[in-house]
Image (cartoon, rainbow, N blue to C red):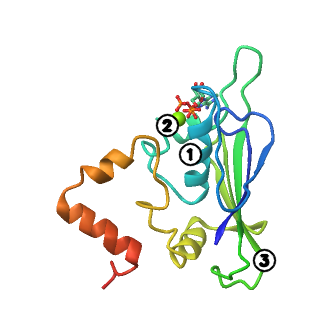
């Protein structure tokens, strides 16, 4: 399973509709400080059910919506869609791709979609947890977070390895 594309609009820095085609196996994104590189990771995490505001580097979920700039008006909603290549059928849907999308409006109303169909938060969570993406500790290692792994207490590091190995539940 790997990421195929990320589409965002109105999310943090990305006021305009922006699609990144993520070529297998390695993608590097370069840009000056503050250009939105980490915001792309925030979009990925948010789409894949992250609810922790600190992890999303926001004070409120509304901070995820483009808040305007010197030359552009704020927008009314943010959306982000992650498309997975599912040729190895990790999601057990039998389809070549699986898409997960999330939207939030200024009213705080929020939508989840799987392959374009309206679903509930827990439907996405359930689907992700069957693939290992439901765990939030290791699929995303953010800026400055390597250090956290090196400085973990032995029990914490043990828990991380158990999670990676898929044996936590035992
Ligand atoms: P660095 O190289 O320093 O890590 P980066 O490319 O990772 O930088 P980000 O942290 O992704 O940069 O982007 C930070 C910028 O995103 C801030 O300067 C801020 O202006 C902008 N930003 C964050 N949230 C919003 C929002 N809701 N609306 C508009 N801009 C936003
Ligand atoms: Mg950054």
Q: Residue at x 58, y 60 (%)?
A: 48
Query: Does residue 166 sit above or below 138 in this rendering?
Result: below
Ligand 1 quarter of the rendering: top right
Q: Is the shortest distance between ligand 1 and the CB of mark 2 under 8 Å?
A: yes
Q: CA distance from mark 2 to mark 3?
A: 34 Å
Q: Position of residue 73 (x, y in %)?
A: 76, 22
Q: Position of residue 148 (x, y in %)?
A: 31, 48
Seen from this angle, which residue lies furthest top? Answer: 70
Asked if the residue at tag 3 contacts the one at tag 1, i.e. Cβ–Cβ closer than 8 Å, the answer is no
Q: Position of residue 65 (x, y in %)?
A: 65, 36
The residue indicated by pointer 1 is 42
Query: Does residue 116 sit above or below 13 in this rendering?
Result: below
Q: Is the shortest distance between ligand 1 and the CB of mark 1 under 8 Å?
A: yes
The residue indicated by pointer 3 is 96
- On the picture, is 60 further left or further right than 13? left
In front here: 21 or 43? 21
């Amino acid at each position: 399973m790997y990421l195929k594309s990320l589409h965002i609009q109105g999310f943090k820095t990305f006021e305009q509709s922006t699609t990144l085609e993520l070529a297998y196996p390695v993608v590097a994104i370069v840009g000056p400080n503050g250009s939105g590189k980490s915001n792309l990771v925030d979009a990925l995490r948010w789409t894949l059910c992250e609810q922790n505001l600190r992890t999303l580097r926001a004070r409120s979920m509304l901070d995820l919506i483009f808040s305007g700039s010197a030359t552009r008006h704020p927008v009314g909603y943010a959306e982000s869609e992650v498309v997975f290549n599912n040729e190895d059928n990790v999601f057990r849907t039998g389809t070549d791709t699986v898409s997960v999308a999330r939207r939030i409006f200024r009213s705080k109303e929020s939508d989840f979609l799987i392959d374009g169909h309206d679903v509930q938060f827990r439907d996405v969570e359930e689907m992700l947890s069957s693939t290992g993406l439901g765990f939030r500790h290791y699929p995303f290692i953010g800026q400055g977070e390597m250090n956290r792994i090196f400085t973990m207490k032995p029990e914490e590091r043990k828990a991380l390895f158990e999670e990676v190995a898929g044996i936590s539940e035992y």
